[in-house]
Image (cartoon, grey):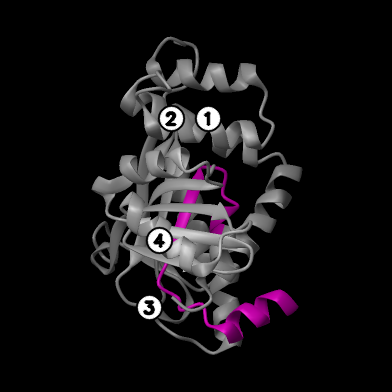
């Protein structure tokens, strides 16, 4: 997808802003809770949990917070509210398909907040399955480029089971089938690379291209969705062309 890696870099810069607003720790803690709930609290056997904890540590989350999140996930901490994963589907401006993933202790609040953003910014919340068929779940990792050139990045991807790689001067994106998540994560670790992102994410099968002004409207809607407290991830099928990236950078 054109401009995808550049967009990932912009998202990382936005992540730093989220940290200043105090939101990043909450989202990272929820990642730890869900990972521990699904695969147990052992970092040696639960790869998703290990990566979630590594990411939390990289963001300087206090050790006590991480341990508390693990205990909430495994059920050892009975005092915390029970989180669950839920996703919503809809359309943003100009017919762009959107999937919103939440981790919440109150689904009624989540759907109300998500619907309110769609309605306010010219989109519409749909039924489950209304846009999901346009996406497929993939393993997704990013690592700093460092001194890895483009050829070496492709060789690395081939060796560790990734099926696609996007390289630029700042970041390398690796994607692969869901079944290869553990293999890719272990391969990166063995090669001495610590992912900045490691997740199962929804990738569009096809993308839609819009004029930059229209694309900015869509990206504003997506940003507002990401600002909802219960939202963890927002996926869309907008084509991130160089013109769109430039418009975002200059906005």
- Closer to the chain start, of discs 3 and 4, is 4
User: CB of mark 3 within 8 Å of CB of mark 2?
Assistant: no
Q: Which residues are magenta?
A: 225-251
Q: Nearer the viewer, mark 1 or mark 4?
A: 4
Mark 4 Cα-neighbour bin, 10 Å: few <14, some 14–19, many ≥20: few
- Closer to the chain start, of discs 3 and 2, is 2
- The residue that appears at 47% across and 61% down in the rendered structure is 153
Instruction: Tell me the quarter of the picture where residue 250 sits.
Output: bottom right
Counting from the top left corner in percent of width and height, residue 157 is at 38, 57
Q: Which residue is mark 4?
A: 155
Which quadrant is the N terminus positioned in?
bottom left
Q: Residue 207: which disc?
A: 3
Marks 3 and 4, how far apart at CA: 27 Å
Marks 1 and 2, how far apart at CA: 6 Å
Q: Which residue is mark 1?
A: 53
Mark 2 Cα-neighbour bin, 10 Å: few <14, some 14–19, many ≥20: many
Q: Nearer the viewer, mark 3 or mark 4?
A: 4
Marks 1 and 4, how far apart at CA: 28 Å
- Closer to the chain start, of discs 4 and 2, is 2
Q: Which residue is mark 2?
A: 49
Element at label 2: helix
Asked whether residue 165 is in view, the answer is yes
- Closer to the chain start, of discs 3 and 1, is 1
Q: Is residue 114 magenta?
A: no
Marks 3 and 1, how far apart at CA: 33 Å
Q: Nearer the viewer, mark 4 or mark 2?
A: 4
């Amino acid at each position: 997808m054109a401009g995808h890696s550049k967009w990932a870099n912009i998202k990382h810069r936005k992540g730093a802003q989220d940290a200043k607003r105090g939101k990043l720790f909450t989202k990272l803690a929820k990642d730890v809770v869900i990972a521990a709930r699904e695969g147990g609290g052992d970092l040696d056997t639960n790869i998703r949990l290990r990566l979630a904890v590594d990411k939390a540590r990289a963001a300087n989350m206090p050790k006590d917070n991480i341990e508390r999140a693990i205990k909430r996930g495994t059920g050892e901490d009975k005092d915390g509210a029970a989180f669950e994963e839920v996703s919503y589907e809809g359309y943003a401006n100009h017919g762009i398909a959107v999937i919103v993933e939440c981790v919440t202790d109150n689904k009624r609040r989540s759907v109300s907040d998500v619907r309110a953003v769609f309605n306010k910014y010219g989109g519409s919340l749909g039924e489950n399955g209304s846009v999901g068929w346009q996406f497929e779940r993939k393993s997704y990792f990013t690592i700093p480029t460092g001194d890895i050139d483009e050829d070496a990045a492709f060789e690395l991807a081939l060796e560790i089971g990734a099926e696609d790689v996007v390289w630029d001067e700042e970041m390398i994106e690796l994607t692969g089938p869901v079944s290869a998540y553990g293999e890719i994560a272990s391969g990166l670790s063995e090669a001495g690379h610590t992912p900045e992102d490691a997740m199962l994410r929804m990738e569009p099968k096809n993308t839609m291209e819009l004029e930059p002004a229209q694309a900015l409207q869509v990206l504003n809607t997506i940003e507002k969705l990401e600002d909802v407290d219960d939202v963890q991830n927002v996926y869309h099928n907008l084509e991130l062309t160089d013109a769109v990236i430039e418009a975002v950078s200059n906005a």
